[in-house]
Image (spheres, rainbow, N blue to C red):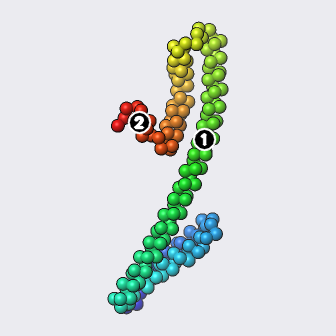
Amino acid sequence: MAISDRIRAEAKRTIDGMTKYYKEYSDYADESEELEHRIARIEASMEGCNGLSQEDKVQKTAENVFELTCAQERTYDALRCELKRTRQTIRDELKEGLEGLKSDLKSDLGRMEKKIEESGSDSSATCKHHKHFITKFISENPAMSCGVFVFFLILVFLSGHFELIAKMCGVK
């Protein structure tokens, strides 16, 4: 039995789509080799759809499964590498953002403290004063306070210590 027109058309559509993708988005030197392997897997799978003997079909199916397994493992490794690079990039950007936020927060706190001192409401440096200062700061800057809270929550989540913080807050 010959390979059906439907199977040939599906293989051609798939190979054309892969080739177009690699032409438009390829940014690695070894991708052309990977494209050749992917095309070879499609062609090998297509061969298994013709009138081979039962033994040859079983052998062709085993070879195709082996090729797919190898491709899956290479893809898994590539995804893990990309995830690691992306995670590091996010961490670096968050660290830069945190430094900027710290700087902004220090200057904002300095201005707030100066305003409080100038207003004459700064009677002492007691704990009560600090609580009042923090409360006043949050009430006067709700958007920034919320942003800082969300930013730190994201940092905790990305650092992997979310469960530890949840335990400290009594969440089970």
- Give me the C-alpha separation between circle 1 and circle 2: 22 Å
**Label total for image:** 2
Q: Earlier in the sequence, mark 1 or mark 2?
A: 1
Can you identify the residue that label 2 sits on? Answer: 166
Q: Residues within 10 Å of mark 1 (few under 14, many from 20)?
A: few
Residue 95 has which mark?
1
- The residue located at (43%, 85%) in the rendering is 47
Q: Is residue 29 above or below residue 44?
A: above
The image position of residue 77, as x and y in percent, is 51, 63
Secondary structure at numbered mark 2: helix
Q: Nearer the viewer, residue 103 or 18?
A: 103
Q: Amino acid at mark 2?
A: Ala
The image position of residue 136, as x and y in percent, is 54, 19
Secondary structure at numbered mark 1: helix
Q: Is residue 11 above or below residue 74?
A: below
Quarter in which the C terminus is drawn: top left
Q: Amino acid at mark 1?
A: Lys
Q: Is residue 121 visible?
A: no
Residue 71 has which mark?
none
- The residue located at (63%, 41%) in the rendering is 96
Q: Is residue 133 visible?
A: yes
The image position of residue 90, as x and y in percent, is 57, 47
Q: Quadrant of residue 32?
A: bottom right
- The residue located at (62%, 20%) in the rendering is 112
Quarter in which the N terminus is drawn: bottom left
The image position of residue 54, as x and y in percent, is 34, 88
Q: Nearer the viewer, residue 139 or 58?
A: 58
**CB-based contact (under 8 Å), mark 1 and mark 2:** no
Q: Nearer the viewer, residue 106 or 119?
A: 106
Residue 132 lies left or right of residue 4; in this view the side is: right
- The residue located at (41%, 36%) in the rendering is 166
Q: Residues within 10 Å of mark 2 (few under 14, many from 20)?
A: few
